[in-house]
Image (cartoon, rainbow, N blue to C red):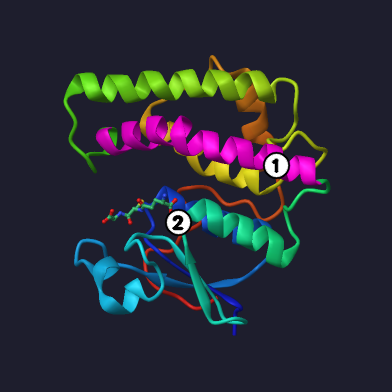
């Protein structure tokens, strides 16, 4: 039996982020598809796993505890498995800086542009243009860091911060947000995609529930 169960749905960026963390950490996981269209994420059973009524959630069978909020889950996994947790406290702190920054700046820009382009959400054109412009502004900021640092935490190895940020940048293609003006980000994307256990936004998450 796998230690971890991931609850989510395949088009969800935050769900992908957690799946990628598990995969890079070499942790096989059971997967439970949560049908948002049918409101399963608001059912009393699911709310036991996620107080916010959103996907993803992660159940750790060792403690029988479940957690929500993808960025918090990534950091829990880093701490509890010892993988992608950085070497120095400063690396973890810098990684967290970027994670919080992404929740404010990068994530909304890329995820909402993608949602509009794929028809998951309807915004007036000028609102979509605003999100897209914000995505590029955020990528420019990230680019200036990654031109001088191999990894998000600023150390010699990848951390949960790379997984978190890749869980957004990996959707730039679907969002129609090109990376050509952000060469540092492009090179970092290649480094992340070369990590053992990497699987892409199109392939990692199953469409239905499955055992590890
Ligand atoms: N900040 C949360 C975002 C989670 C989130 O918004 N998930 C979406 C799917 S991508 C969801 O469950 N939406 C359903 C709803 O808001 O009712 C995280 O990173 O886990």
Where does the magenta region start and end? 89-116
Q: Which residue is mark 1?
A: 93
Q: Are marks 1 and 2 in contact (CB under 8 Å)?
A: no
Q: Which of 198/107 is in front?
A: 107
Mark-to-mark CA distance, 1 and 2: 23 Å
| Relative side of 159 to 55, left or right | right
Q: Quadrant of residue 182?
A: top right
Q: Position of residue 80 (x, y in %)?
A: 69, 67
| Residue at 70% from the left image edge and 42% from the top image edge | 93
Q: Position of residue 179 (x, y in %)?
A: 52, 22
Label 1 crowd bin: few (<14), some (14–19), many (20+), radius 10 Å: some
| Relative side of 87 to 184, left or right | right
Label 2 crowd bin: few (<14), some (14–19), many (20+), radius 10 Å: many
| Residue at 57% from the left image edge and 52% from the top image edge | 199
Q: Which residue is mark 2?
A: 15
Q: Quadrant of residue 190?
A: top right
Residue 42 - label? none
Please state, as top left, top right, bottom left or bottom right, where the C terminus lies in the image: bottom right
Q: Is mark 2 within 8 Å of ligand 1?
A: yes
Q: What secondary structure do most residues of the magenta stretch adopt?
A: helix
């Amino acid at each position: 039996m796998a230690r971890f169960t991931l609850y989510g749905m395949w088009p969800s960026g935050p769900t992908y982020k957690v799946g990628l963390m598990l995969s890079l950490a070499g942790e096989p996981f059971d997967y439970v598809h949560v049908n948002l269209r049918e409101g399963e994420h608001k059912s009393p059973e699911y709310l036991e796993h996620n107080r916010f009524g959103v996907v993803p959630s992660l159940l750790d069978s060792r403690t029988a505890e479940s957690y929500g909020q993808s960025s918090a889950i990534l950091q829990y996994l880093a701490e509890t498995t010892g993988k992608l947790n950085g070497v120095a406290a400063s690396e973890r702190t810098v990684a967290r800086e970027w994670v919080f920054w992404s929740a404010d700046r990068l994530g909304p820009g890329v995820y909402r542009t993608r949602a509009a382009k794929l028809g998951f959400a309807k915004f007036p054109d000028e609102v979509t243009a605003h999100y897209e412009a914000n995505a590029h502004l955020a990528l420019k900021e990230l680019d200036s860091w990654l031109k001088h640092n191999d990894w998000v935490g600023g150390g010699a190895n990848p951390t949960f911060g790379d997984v978190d940020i890749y869980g957004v940048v990996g959707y730039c293609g679907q969002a129609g947000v090109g990376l050509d003006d952000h060469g540092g980000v492009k090179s970092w994307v290649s480094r992340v995609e070369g990590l053992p256990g990497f699987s892409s936004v199109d392939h990692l998450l199953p469409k239905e529930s499955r055992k590890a």
